[in-house]
Image (tube, rainbow, N blue to C red):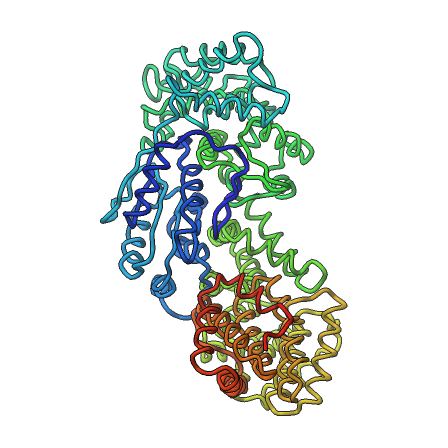
């Protein structure tokens, strides 16, 4: 099962048992505002939460939303993660918690926070705030311990029953067939052996799944015998391998020393660091994460670890720095080195999938947090923690470079999504680079910042750019990019004074460095600031001057296209519509040839506005829908909000008042997502007002208000889909 932020994760494997727990959760979600599922790692809290939330979702007008907190190393990204989960991409200067409280204030929804145990204090504080201000909010949390929030109702999740109920045995059989449809418990003695395995594993779902994955190398009876031997062994430790294990992989890794797991050829018994009967990994483990009463799961994971080849164990450890889903290319970049060649990474990854250590969904992979913890302990034992973090940071710095270079081109949309989807890994890489490689951090913050600004991560874009500037001296294009990112983020937050300041700094730095792309970027930032503050003549003059100064820059350069966009906006604002239309058409064609969507969408927006000014509302609506299609592909909520406004105006101008009102309502919902009242260049305001009056006049105030409220209350995707339909409802 791959977890995704927003809505609910898909269930990609069978769900077994839990009728009593689901009934209890149904009552809790109906009568309580905050419920926490507690239990040890691997007991099935996440699966239970998904199933309960899916069953309850229809009872909430605004649906059920999911936030996976397991990748967060601390509370620094807690608020952005929860905001993303509920569809908020705040573009304002408000405190993030204030924006979140306002966004949730009138919502009736179920919010699920998964894996909150390592953020108990911050989560408790946040939930106390949003539950107080959002009376229609219900929260379901999964955690290994209660959060301690006032009003919290705790439901303990036990293992599956192993005596008197078939649930654990059914799970074992299901996972057996999932790995091999021909497999089953048909041979004499298989069912009894499987039942014994489930009993030995105390009904813990993750332990049972790991055991079922080992059947490929053993019969069910052999597996039962091995597990029985393993669990009857002295101390039933973590299952750390001996000299054939991960610490003895190859020359250069060295044999384990005294006190290390397997250092004396045993499972770490009698190690000198912890006294008799204590394994080294017992000492490494946090008692709140691996309490002694849950040794069964620890032992099952250790046994699964033993079944892996040495290179699979090494990959298991090296994958742990990854925060988000990954593909094979990322696995190779982050994990290859020494005996683990890129080809060996591919083979070992498939081995970990076969062992259920890594989960696969299409071409994406993910490791459960409980298994990641185990791998992270091994990474520490290997002494590779810093080296793994270095590789991770280098990989994501390279991703930022390639995304920056691919902004203009046929892969723009996929790069946009990749930067958005790997947000937590990019933040982790930046944190590491800020501590260990300032030059790399400065380059990365500059290259990824515009993506973040467009994705709605304005606070992170601005914060990391400022931290990178403050970290040490920086010159040349990296400095200009950081100033530019700061200015663009400030502009989108409505902080025009800061945007103007950084536009001037960008211009001065680019002139000093003779950096043509920096000059074009500075002209875009300064020009857009001037447009937003009612100075189109100055924007037109500056963009034209810089375009003439930088004629050597390719016409399809991202900065050059954006600078041309300033020219189009300025000509429209000045009423020079024929020139503006010609410039916008030329710009759109240039973007289309290169596969560029972001600038092309704003060229469509300008063509829609021009057509409306010229009395061609049908053409305006067609351009507006083209803009919306592009912005939807880019997940650009701010651009969608602008596009819905101009589309509503074009529909109103055609006499379809109720349809225009509904589109205006959907647009209002998107404006709320970004935390702004309606925004845009000054000339758009009168257009909105005039067309709203037309729509009201066409259907009457009462019908207009009903349609507006319908659009505002629609699911955003449903409302956008309705707006994109071309037939008019006159």
Q: Is residue 329 shown left or right of residue 65? A: right
Instruction: Tell me if 691 is positioned left or right of 130 in this view.
Output: right
Which residue is nearer to you in this view: 70 or 45? 45
* x, y percent for residue 495: 44, 76
x, y percentage for residue 433?
Answer: 51, 52
Q: In this rendering, would 262 be left or right of 477? A: left
Tell me where residue 521 sits by quadrant. bottom right
Residue 712, quarter of picture: bottom left
Q: Residue pushed farthest left? A: 150
- Nearest the eye: 411 or 287: 411
How far across and how far down the image is residue 268, in percent?
A: 42, 17
Quarter containing the C terminus: bottom right
Regarding residue 92, the answer to whether it shows in the image is yes
Give me the residue at 66% from left, 63% from top. 407
The answer to which of 319 and 69 lies nearer the viewer is 69
Which residue is drawn at the image coordinates 34% and 15% (left, top)?
Answer: 277
């Amino acid at each position: 099962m791959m977890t995704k932020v927003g809505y609910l994760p898909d269930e990609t494997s069978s769900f077994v048992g839990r009728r009593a727990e689901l009934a209890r959760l149904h009552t809790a979600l109906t009568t309580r505002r905050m419920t926490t599922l507690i239990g040890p790692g691997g007991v099935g809290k996440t699966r239970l939460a998904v199933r309960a939330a899916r069953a309850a979702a229809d009872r909430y007008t605004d649906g059920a939303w999911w936030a996976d907190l397991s990748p967060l190393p601390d509370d620094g990204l807690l608020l952005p993660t929860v905001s993303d989960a509920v569809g908020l991409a705040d573009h304002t200067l408000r405190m993030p918690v204030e924006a979140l409280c306002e966004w949730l204030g009138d919502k009736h929804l179920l919010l699920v926070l998964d894996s909150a145990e390592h953020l108990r204090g911050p989560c408790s504080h946040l939930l106390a705030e949003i539950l107080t201000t959002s009376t229609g909010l219900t929260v379901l949390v999964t955690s290994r311990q209660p959060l301690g929030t006032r009003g919290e109702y705790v439901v303990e999740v036990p293992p599956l029953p192993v005596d008197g109920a078939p649930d654990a045995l059914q799970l074992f059989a299901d996972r057996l067939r999932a790995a091999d449809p021909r497999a089953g418990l048909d041979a004499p003695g298989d069912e009894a052996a499987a039942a014994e395995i489930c009993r030995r594993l105390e009904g813990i779902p993750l332990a049972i799944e790991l055991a079922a994955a080992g059947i490929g190398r053993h019969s069910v009876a052999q597996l039962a015998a091995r597990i029985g031997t393993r669990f009857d062994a002295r101390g039933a430790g973590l299952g750390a391998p001996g000299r054939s294990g991960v610490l003895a992989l190859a020359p250069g890794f060295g044999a384990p020393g005294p006190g290390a797991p397997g250092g004396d050829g045993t499972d770490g018994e009698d190690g000198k660091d912890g006294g008799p009967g204590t394994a080294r990994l017992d000492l490494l483990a946090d008692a709140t994460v691996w309490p002694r009463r849950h040794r069964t799961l620890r032992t099952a994971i250790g046994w699964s670890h033993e079944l892996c080849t040495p290179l699979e164990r090494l990959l298991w450890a090296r994958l742990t720095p990854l925060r988000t889903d990954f593909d094979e290319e990322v696995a190779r970049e982050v994990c290859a080195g020494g005996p683990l060649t890129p080809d060996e990474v591919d083979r070992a990854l498939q081995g970990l999938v076969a062992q259920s250590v890594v989960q696969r969904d299409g071409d994406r992979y993910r490791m459960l947090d409980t298994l990641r913890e185990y791998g992270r302990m091994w990474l520490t034992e290997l002494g590779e923690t810093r080296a793994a973090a270095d590789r991770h940071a280098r990989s994501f710095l390279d991703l930022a470079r390639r995304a920056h270079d691919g902004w203009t081109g046929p892969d723009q949309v996929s790069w946009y999504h990749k930067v958005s989807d790997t947000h937590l890994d990019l933040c982790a890489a930046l944190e590491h680079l800020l501590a260990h490689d300032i030059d790399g951090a400065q380059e990365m913050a500059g290259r990824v910042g515009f993506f973040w600004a467009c994705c709605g991560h304005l606070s992170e874009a601005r914060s990391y750019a400022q931290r990178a500037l403050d970290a040490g001296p920086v010159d040349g294009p990296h400095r200009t990019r950081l100033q530019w990112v700061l200015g663009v983020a400030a502009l989108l937050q409505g902080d025009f004074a800061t945007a103007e300041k950084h536009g001037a700094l960008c211009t001065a730095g680019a002139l000093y460095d003779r950096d043509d792309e920096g000059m074009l970027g500075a002209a875009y930032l300064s020009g857009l600031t001037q447009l937003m503050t009612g100075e189109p003549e100055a924007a037109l003059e500056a963009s034209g001057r810089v375009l003439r100064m930088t004629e050597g820059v390719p016409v399809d350069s991202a900065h050059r296209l954006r600078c041309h966009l300033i020219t189009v906006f300025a000509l429209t604002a000045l009423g020079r519509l024929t020139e503006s239309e010609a410039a916008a058409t030329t710009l759109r064609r240039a973007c289309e040839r290169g596969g560029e969507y972001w600038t092309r969408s704003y060229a469509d927006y300008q063509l829609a506005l021009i057509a409306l000014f010229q009395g061609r509302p049908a053409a305006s609506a067609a351009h507006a829908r083209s803009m919306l299609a592009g912005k939807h592909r880019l997940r650009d909520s701010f651009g969608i909000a602008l596009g819905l406004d101009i589309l509503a105006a074009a529909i109103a101008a055609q006499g379809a008042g109720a349809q225009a009102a509904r589109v205006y309502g959907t647009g209002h919902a998107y404006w709320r997502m970004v935390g702004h009242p309606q925004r845009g260049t000054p000339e758009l305001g009168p257009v909105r007002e005039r067309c709203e009056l037309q729509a009201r006049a066409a259907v009457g105030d009462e019908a207009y208000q009903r349609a507006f409220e319908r659009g505002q209350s629609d699911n955003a995707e449903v409302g956008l889909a309705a707006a994109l339909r071309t037939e008019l409802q006159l």
